[in-house]
Amino acid sequence: MKAVICERLGPPEDLVLRDIAAPPPPGPGQVLIKVAAAGVNFPDTLIIEGRYQLRPTLPFSPGSEVAGTVAALGEGVAGLAVGQRVLALTLYGGFAEQVLADAARVFAIPDAMPFDIAAGFALTYATGQHALR
């Protein structure tokens, strides 16, 4: 599958598009998502520059916020179904064709919500809510 990869810490223009192995089947409590859109957020930039508290092992695919459809469910996942439209917070890995996410961080979206809007919704909403407090 295709993924945007951070091979070394640096600016966004250092990211590369690569063919990588698809994720394994989802484990207990996980959801495999076919990514339709990914949000690009300031924390993603901080992570690829090595200036964020989370430091994934290199190389990795950035992308902390995605929208798409459920491709597979791990054991014990309830309230979601294969083919369902969702958004997810992934920490990283979202700039790829598929990503595994913890089911607790996957949320159904309405049919009327475009994937590109859903992919940029959660972090922007949380930032706005925090600013208003």
Image (tube, rainbow, N blue to C red):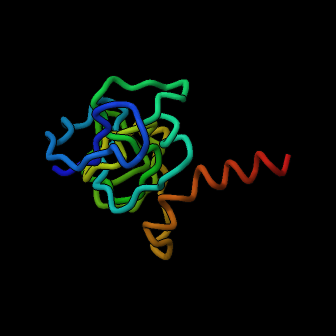
Q: Is residue 39 above or below residue 101?
A: below
Give the answer, above or below, for where 65 lies relative to 67. Answer: above
Residue at the spot x=32%, y=31% of the render? 8
Q: Along the line of sight, which residue is nearer the eye, 7 or 57?
A: 7
Query: Residue at coordinates 30% horizontally, 26% vertically from top-left?
Result: 58
119 on left or right of 61: right
Residue 80, given in percent of the width and then of the height, sits at: 39, 51
Question: 53 or 8, which lies in front?
Answer: 8
Q: Is residue 112 left or right of residue 36?
A: right
Q: What is the number of callouts on the image?
A: 0
* Residue nearest the observer in this picture, 34 or 63: 63
- Up-down relation of residue 92 to residue 126 (above or below): above
In the depicted view, which residue is nearer to us: 55 or 10? 10
Residue 78 is situated, as x and y percent measured from the top left of the image, at 40, 43
Q: Residue at x 28, y 49 (%)?
A: 96
Which residue of the protein is positioned furthest toward the bottom in this rendering? 112
Question: Where residue 69 sits in the image (x, y, percent)?
Answer: 33, 59
Where does residue 108 sit, x and y in percent of width and height? 47, 57
Q: Residue at x 41, y 46 (%)?
A: 12
Q: Residue furthest right?
A: 133
Image quarter for residue 93?
top left
